[in-house]
Image (cartoon, rainbow, N blue to C red):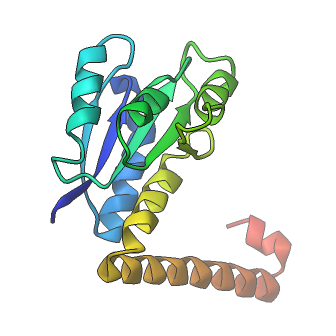
Amino acid sequence: MDIQVGIIMGSKSDLPIMSEAAAALEELGVGYELTVVSAHRTPERMVDYANSARDRGLKVIIAGAGGAAHLPGMVASMTSLPVIGVPIKSSNSIDGWDSVLSILQMPGGIPVATVALNGAKNAGILAASIIGAFDTSIGKNLDQYKERLKAKVIESAEELETKGWKKFLSQ
């Protein structure tokens, strides 16, 4: 499986959240790489990563960061690839809002798609959707994934309607 998505994070402590993007990509059949790239502690590594991404075959970059969360925007400023930012509620965070706003409020000309706080799973699905717009195999995997989501809702509704809400809660 070709590596098409780069998943980067500012710190190893972000891995429990960012692993959800990796799991979503695995489920959807999209190859990825995953590493730590800090905008503040290893700026040269960040520049090298962003500048080499297209030549290495990446099509989308998912960048997770907490606190000031400069990683997604800085990477987006150095590549024309789509960048999806994942704001992470970190130990030094102001309830996650600092991360959300740092990624969300990008200046004109440097877009970063932004998912919810700790929303790495959706970042993985969005990356697969971007690739799936041009790759019919990945597109079909996404269609099947959405059908499975639909089936889970229908199953829950039928169970609730059959057993009643009180029995439903006791499970």
In the displayed structure image, the side of residue 123 where residue 50 appears, left or right: left
Name the image quarter holding residue 36. top left
How far from the left and from the top, in percent, is residue 64?
Answer: 45, 34
Residue at screen point 28% across, 64% down: 30
Compared with residue 104, is residue 58 higher up or lower down, i.e. above or below? below
- Identify which residue, 17 or 45, lies in the foreground: 45
In the displayed structure image, the side of residue 69 where residue 43 appears, left or right: left
How far from the left and from the top, in percent, is residue 91?
Answer: 54, 16
In the displayed structure image, the side of residue 100 where residue 28 appears, left or right: left
Quarter of the image with the C terminus in it: bottom right
Residue at screen point 56% across, 18% down: 67
Compared with residue 99, is residue 50 higher up or lower down, i.e. above or below? below
Name the image quarter holding residue 24. bottom left
Compared with residue 108, is residue 125 higher up or lower down, i.e. above or below? below
Total number of numbered discs in the rendering: 0
How far from the left and from the top, in percent, is residue 44?
Answer: 24, 16
In the displayed structure image, the side of residue 20 where residue 96 appears, left or right: right
Residue at screen point 43% across, 64% down: 130
- Identify which residue, 117 or 4, lies in the foreground: 4
Quarter of the image with the N terminus in it: bottom left
- Identify which residue, 4 or 67, lies in the foreground: 4
Residue at screen point 53% across, 84% down: 147
How far from the left and from the top, in percent, is residue 5?
Answer: 30, 52
